[in-house]
């Protein structure tokens, strides 16, 4: 576990206040470990991501979910031109908060889970800085189809 020795970012939302449900928190942890694999290649963080999905979603849906999460990340990396800011899942202070990028990601996923494509597209457009979001939306909708649906009245919070 990494020690939290850097200043807090006031734009971040505490995870407990974010409105993310259990499935989204599991996806968040998976996303963070996959992304860590790109930035810290000295450890196979992708294996942890696969294990987390198996633990959270079971042996039948875990592999499908982890593959779907990875497809979302790959689509996001093709569309977004700047760095996606995410919190290190091993940092005691940071892992309990959502970055601005993570918030947009989960707002798009939440709207996809609600079946509200126009709002999911709007969040994806902001997340991808106006670039093409078609592959990202398709990947998010596939991921959303593996997760329970949520009522329209329950969006992820944008501010604290």
Image: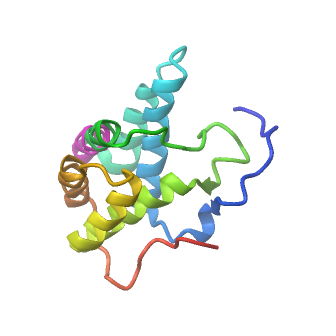
The secondary structure that most of the magenta stretch takes on is: helix
The region drawn magenta spans 60-70
Is 152 situated left or right of 115 in this image? Answer: right
| Quarter containing the N terminus | top right
Q: Can residue 27 be seen in this view?
A: yes
Looking at the image, which residue is at 20% across and 58% down?
Answer: 141
Residue at the limit of the structure toward the top, as seen here: 42
Is 145 situated left or right of 65 in this image? Answer: left
Q: Can residue 148 be seen in this view?
A: no
**Above or below for 33 versus 120:** above
Q: Nearer the viewer, residue 66 or 119?
A: 119
Looking at the image, which residue is at 25% across and 59% down?
Answer: 144
**Above or below for 77 versus 135:** above
Looking at the image, which residue is at 39% across and 39% down?
Answer: 81
Q: Quadrant of residue 22?
A: bottom left
Q: In which quarter of the image is residue 70?
A: top left
Q: Which of 137 and 35 is in front in this view?
A: 137
Query: Which x, y percent locates residue 96?
Result: 65, 54
Query: Which x, y percent locates residue 92?
Result: 72, 44
Total number of numbered labels? 0
| Quarter containing the C terminus | bottom right
């Amino acid at each position: 576990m990494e020690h939290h020795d850097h200043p807090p970012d006031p734009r971040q939302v505490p995870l407990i206040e974010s409105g993310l449900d259990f499935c989204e928190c599991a996806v968040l942890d998976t996303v963070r470990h996959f992304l860590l694999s790109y930035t810290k290649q000295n450890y196979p963080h992708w294996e942890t991501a696969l294990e987390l999905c198996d633990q959270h979603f079971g042996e039948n849906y875990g592999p499908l979910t982890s593959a779907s999460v990875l497809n979302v990340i790959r689509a996001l990396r093709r569309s977004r031109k700047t760095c996606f800011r995410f919190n290190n899942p091993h940092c005691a202070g940071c892992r309990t908060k959502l970055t601005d990028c993570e918030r947009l990601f989960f707002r798009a996923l939440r709207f996809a889970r609600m079946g509200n494509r126009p709002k999911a597209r709007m969040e994806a457009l902001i997340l991808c800085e106006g670039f093409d979001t078609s592959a990202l939306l398709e990947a998010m909708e596939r991921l959303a189809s593996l997760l329970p649906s949520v009522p329209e009245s329950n969006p992820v919070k944008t501010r604290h």
